[in-house]
Image (cartoon, helix red, strand yellow):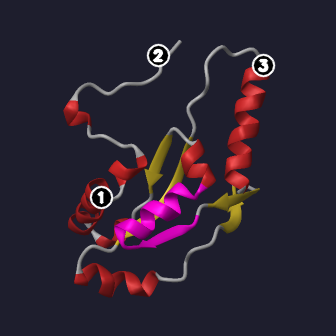
């Protein structure tokens, strides 16, 4: 996986430059959990978008992570098999803003309730957010 290789290289170079701490790294993915009949109807249009995309950003060739669509159990397995997702400290979800606030709130809720806990995520309602100290 190209992004996992890039993360590994970045962290090695960071350490070889003499930095004492491990840098935080994030990746982004589009993840659409199918938990209702309405989800199934909408997301079936997005099936088959499951490979990395390559494009140009600011004149540089860039790799974009794949789009995941499926039932929560399938998504958990697929995301755990995504080396970059598992290497990163943060998974940022990209969401289709043109579908509106209500749609996206439901999408995020479905991910947080049905997928994220199996990936090691815990709500910050359970206490203060923990993280690395900033130098």
Residue 82 percent location from the top left of the image = 58, 57
Q: Earlier in the sequence, mark 1 or mark 3?
A: 3
Q: Which quadrant holds the N terminus? A: bottom right
Label 2 residue SS: loop
* Residue at the image position 36 percent from the left and 25 percent from the top: 130
Label 3 residue SS: loop
- Mark yes or no: residue 96 visible: no
Q: Nearer the viewer, residue 20 or 116?
A: 116
Q: Name the side, left or right, on which 67 lies relative to 71.
A: right
* Total numbered circles: 3
**Residue 51: which disc?**
none
Residue 96 percent location from the top left of the image = 39, 67
Q: Earlier in the sequence, mark 3 or mark 2?
A: 3
Q: Name the side, left or right, on which 94 lies relative to 35.
A: right
In the rendered image, which residue does mark 3 sit on?
Answer: 17
**Residue 108: which disc?**
1
Classify mark 1: residues with Cα within 10 Å, few (<14), some (14-19) or many (20+): some
* Residue at the image position 75 percent from the left and 14 percent from the top: 18
In the rendered image, which residue does mark 2 sit on?
Answer: 133
Residue 22 percent location from the top left of the image = 61, 24
User: Where 38 sits versus 56, above or below?
Assistant: below
Q: Nearer the viewer, residue 76 or 104?
A: 76
* Residue at the image position 55 percent from the left and 50 percent from the top: 85
Magenta span contains residue 76: yes
Q: Earlier in the sequence, mark 1 or mark 2?
A: 1
* Residue at the image position 57 percent from the left and 58 percent from the top: 81
Residue 90 percent location from the top left of the image = 48, 42
Gap in angstroms between the C-alphas marked 3 and 2: 19 Å
Q: Magenta region: which residues?
A: 66-82
Gap in angstroms between the C-alphas marked 1 and 3: 38 Å
């Amino acid at each position: 996986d190209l992004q996992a290789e890039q993360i590994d290289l970045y962290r090695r170079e960071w350490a070889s430059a003499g930095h004492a701490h491990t840098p935080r790294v994030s990746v982004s993915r589009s993840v659409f959990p199918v938990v209702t009949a309405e989800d199934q109807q909408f997301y079936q249009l997005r099936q088959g978008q499951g490979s990395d995309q390559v494009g140009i950003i600011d004149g540089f060739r860039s790799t974009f992570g794949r789009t995941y669509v499926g039932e929560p159990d399938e998504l958990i397995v697929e995301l755990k098999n995504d080396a970059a997702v598992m290497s990163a400290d943060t998974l940022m979800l990209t969401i289709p803003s043109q579908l509106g606030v209500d749609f996206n709130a439901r999408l995020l809720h479905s991910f947080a309730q049905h997928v994220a806990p199996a990936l090691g995520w815990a709500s910050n309602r359970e206490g203060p957010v923990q993280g690395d100290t900033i130098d």
